[in-house]
Image (tube, rainbow, N blue to C red):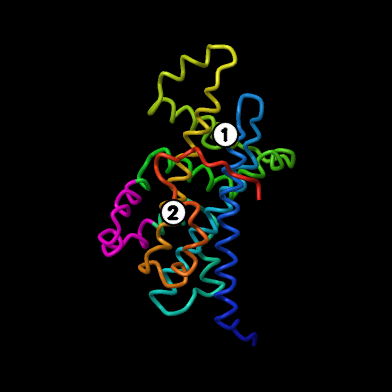
Amino acid sequence: MTKELPVKFRDFSMDEEVVVAIKLIQNGLFELKRIDGQDDFLHLPMLLLSNGFERLMKLILCGVAHKNTGSYPSKNEIKTMGHKLDRLFKKVKEKCFPETYLNDFYFARQDKELLDDPILIELIELLADFASTDRYYDMDCIGGENKIENGDRKLHPEDKWGKLENKLIEEQHPEWFEEYGIPFNNVTEKVSLELVKIIEKFARALCRMFRSKNAGHRLYLNSPEVNCFTQLNDKDLGKLKYIKK
């Protein structure tokens, strides 16, 4: 029978995983900020962001479990959390915003309201699909998989991203549609920047939980590792100069 790993090593792995999650998200934002009319390689930012946010949300759920039970979840319990970001997102919304947290921090209610933003929800669903199946879309097609669902061809992940961009323009900046007809327009860059801001706000909302012991002592000890997002002011959203790690 395999002995359970000592707590000090599990603590160390928690610390290491926080660093990995933050670096993945930062690199994803770095790649997303490079997207323009010439460089539209979306696969890499989607890969990095989906991986980073999966890890970060699982860390938060592990921290809450550690606080509530006095121990980390088992390997099997972590596996049952799955890889679908939309399900992890739902669990975080349900379990990580108790009234004590909402009352103790002035920004907590604002962060909770952000989680109902329709653009963010669609982005999470897009990344969830990408992480689970869509990242192999073309490889599946090479293998002969028929991408037909309910009579229609399943959208390629980059087409889903384009659909999300159109929704953002339609709901927040309808005037940008007219700019598409202007040669050498920068609409792609402007839309990417708006999505960067939404992602930064989401990362900030998750990382702010580290500052509250409501999410557990282990997360609180790692709060310095997430200062890049917790200390991000609204006026600086979209302006950070990410460096590839």
Of 143 and 128, nearer the camera is 128
Q: Amino acid at mark 2?
A: Thr
**Tag 1, which secondary structure?**
loop
Chief SS of the magenta region: helix
Magenta residue span:
93-113
- Residue found 51% across the figure and 33% down from its top: 193
Quarter of the N terminus within the rendering: bottom right
- Residue found 47% across the figure and 79% down from its top: 71
Q: Which mark is residue 230?
A: 2
Q: Which mark is residue 155?
A: 1
Q: Are marks 1 and 2 in contact (CB under 8 Å)?
A: no
Q: Is residue 94 on the magenta stretch?
A: yes
State the image coordinates of residue 182 (x, y, percent, origin top left). Answer: 54, 12
**Earlier along the polypeptide chain: callout 1 or callout 2?**
1
Count residues near mark 1 (Cα–Cα under 10 Å), then give few for <14, some for 14-19, many for 20+.
some
**Tag 2, which secondary structure?**
helix
Q: Which mark is residue 23?
A: none
Rendering quarter of residue 76 = bottom right
Q: Marks 1/2: CA distance?
A: 35 Å
